[in-house]
Image (cartoon, grey):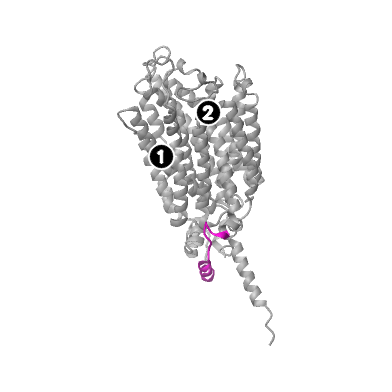
């Protein structure tokens, strides 16, 4: 029946129109905020260490203890994982539109609250910050399945991949903006409140006003999300949810008539027949038979990708220091260090992150999801091994720029590869009534990988020599061996990609098998009608 509904045919065949771009911006600004909020914490963790964990007798600036650093960096991911599962399920139960506004308001409120973290002791401030960042992550988690599902259900089948990829690509701009805002704030505070380097004056190197800098950077993320709230509430429910899940084809046709500016009238018989159809659930044998391997493929690929992706992204400031791209911490004051970390991240976002996202947007509907994901995992493996095997070469003076170029290429092929496709495909291949839930499950598996990457890499990347480790950390396996482990994750992701079907150029109903139900019913009815009469 799904194939015969005129409203779905109209959506699949629709030319690219203004409402497509409006939907991209509205959904994309949520992802802009997601990226800003998740990655901006890595810009200010060194500053937090200097402010709240200063030790006058130490020759090195204060730094967050290992457990505190892991919590501050990783707690938002725990919230995101929970939010992806909860809001993904809720999006299929209540509808995409109703839940979409909830996630945005949670993000805005917790973003502001993160910057207002309070406490009379350093432990109190960090505990409050972690509390609010958990709930910030919870709201961000809901944005993943809902934004992807809404965009896939609004798009036509010819350019659907590019539209969903464009929503996801807003992450690159969120990352870039996080770096730019941190550069502006740190440079402004440094110009107004200059201070000596740590080695010259340990106490004076961190001015009291620096406590405002990190708070402003974190709170700024609420602005773009707040600006799009009104437009999110104005969007009609997606036609596929209204017709296939709520089983109100007439309302779906009415909503899309206004959006597409084309008169769509559903025949009552078709709508009634649709409403009578029996539909299998997530834990049914029929779902396992049709989509079990698909769900395994989307979850494992996203899980493996995020181990590699987030372990690099969150701690790239430590890698820059390891190859001497950033000066030693004691040669800078607190705001100068924040400025240089932000500048490095902005450069990588500009050169490695954003181009990869937009290559995906332009090529995904030409060469397909499967090839992009397979190629991305392959080249990430190549460049990580290219960093790991001659690691000692890259860390010697004169070769640091080469290391940064190789590092940027791993990000380029992550984004022009599995980081984009693992977000896109789960929004296309599952039935409408389970689409948001399955995307949430896949995304939550990814965040489980991000938690392993972000928590694990803090410890794993420590030097094998106990005298060379950061304060409070036990010896690890070193950056070089950590890169080998990450390359292994990419190899595994390469092979699990073969479980995921190509979705280029097909309607959502073809991909999910919702048309097959109808065809099976039609075939059974035809067999019944043409069966020979029994002998008298």
Q: Residue furthest top?
A: 200
Q: Nearer the viewer, residue 69 or 94?
A: 69
Q: Residue 533: horizontal and vertical position, in percent? A: 67, 82
Can you identify the residue that label 1 sits on? Answer: 134
Q: Which of 235 and 296 is in front in this view?
A: 296
Q: Residue 308: horizontal and vertical position, in percent? A: 57, 35
Residues at discs 1 and 2 in contact (Cβ within 8 Å): no
Quadrant containing the C terminus is bottom right
Asked if the magenta segment contains residue 277, the reply would be yes
Apparent side of residue 105 relative to residue 323 in the rendered image (left or right): left
Residue 37 against residue 265 in the figure, above or below = above
Element type where label 1 sits in the image: helix
Q: Which residue is drawn at 54% across and 31% down?
A: 312
Q: In the rendered structure, which segment of residues is drawn in magenta?
A: 267-286
Q: Residue 4: horizontal and vertical position, in percent? A: 58, 65
Q: Residue at x 53, y 32 (%)?
A: 313
In which image quadrant can residue 413 be found?
A: top right
N-terminal of the pair, mark 1 or mark 2, is 1
Asked if the magenta segment contains residue 159, the reply would be no
Apparent side of residue 101 relative to residue 238 in the rendered image (left or right): left
The span from disc 1 to disc 2 (Cα, nearest Å) is 22 Å
Residue 316: give its label.
Answer: 2
Q: How crowded is mark 1: few (under 14 residues within 10 Å), some or many (20 or more)?
A: many
Element type where label 2 sits in the image: helix
Residue 159: give its label.
Answer: none
Can see residue 432? yes
Quadrant containing the N terminus is bottom right
Can see residue 13? no
């Amino acid at each position: 029946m799904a194939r015969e509904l005129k409203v779905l045919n109209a959506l699949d065949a629709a030319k690219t129109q203004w409402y497509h771009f409006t939907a991209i911006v509205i959904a994309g600004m949520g992802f802009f905020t997601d990226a800003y909020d998740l990655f901006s914490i890595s810009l200010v963790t060194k500053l937090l260490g200097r402010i709240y964990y200063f030790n006058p007798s130490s020759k090195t600036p204060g730094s967050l203890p290992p457990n505190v650093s892991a919590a501050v960096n990783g707690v938002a991911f725990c919230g995101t994982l929970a939010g992806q599962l909860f809001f993904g399920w809720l999006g299929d139960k209540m509808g995409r539109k109703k839940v979409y506004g909830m996630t945005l308001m949670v993000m805005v409120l917790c973003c502001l609250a993160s910057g207002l973290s309070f406490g009379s002791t350093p432990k109190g401030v960090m505990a409050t910050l972690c509390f609010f960042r958990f709930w910030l992550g919870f709201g961000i988690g809901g944005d993943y399945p809902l934004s992807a599902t809404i965009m896939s259900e609004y798009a036509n089948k010819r350019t659907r991949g590019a539209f969903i990829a464009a929503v996801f690509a807003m992450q690159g701009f969120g990352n870039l903006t996080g770096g730019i805002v941190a550069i502006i704030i740190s440079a402004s505070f440094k110009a107004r409140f200059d201070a000596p380097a740590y080695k010259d004056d340990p106490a004076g190197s961190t001015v009291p006003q620096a406590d405002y800098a990190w708070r402003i950077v974190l709170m700024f993320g609420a602005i773009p999300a707040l600006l799009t709230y009104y437009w999110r509430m104005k969007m009609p429910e997606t036609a596929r949810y209204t017709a296939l899940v709520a089983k109100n084809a007439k309302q779906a046709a009415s909503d899309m008539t206004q959006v597409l500016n084309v008169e769509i009238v559903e025949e009552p018989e078709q709508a009634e027949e649709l409403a009578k159809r029996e539909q299998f659930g997530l834990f049914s044998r029929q779902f396992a038979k049709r989509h079990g391997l698909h769900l395994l493929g989307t979850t494992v690929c996203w899980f493996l990708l995020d181990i590699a992706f987030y372990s690099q992204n969150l701690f790239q400031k430590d890698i820059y220091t390891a190859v001497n791209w950033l000066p030693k911490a004691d040669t800078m004051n607190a705001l100068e260090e924040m400025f240089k970390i932000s500048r490095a991240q902005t450069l990588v976002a500009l050169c490695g992150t954003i181009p990869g996202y937009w290559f995906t947007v332009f090529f995904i509907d030409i060469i397909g999801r499967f090839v992009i994901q397979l190629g991305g995992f392959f080249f990430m493996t190549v460049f990580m091994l290219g960093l790991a095997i001659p690691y000692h070469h890259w860390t010697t003076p004169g070769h640091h720029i080469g290391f940064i170029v190789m590092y940027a290429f791993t990000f380029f092929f992550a984004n022009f590869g599995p980081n984009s496709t693992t977000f896109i495909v789960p929004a296309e291949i599952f039935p409408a009534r389970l689409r948001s839930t399955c995307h949430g499950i896949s995304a939550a598996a990814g965040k489980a990988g991000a938690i392993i990457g972000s928590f694990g890499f803090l410890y794993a990347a420590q030097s094998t020599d106990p005298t060379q480790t950061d304060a409070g950390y036990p010896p690890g396996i070193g950056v070089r061996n950590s890169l080998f482990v990450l390359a292994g994750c990419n190899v595994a992701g390469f092979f699990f990609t073969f479980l995921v079907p190509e979705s280029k150029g097909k309607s959502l109903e073809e991909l999910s098998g919702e048309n097959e139900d109808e065809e099976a019913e039609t075939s059974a009815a035809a067999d019944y009608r043409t069966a020979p009469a029994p002998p008298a």
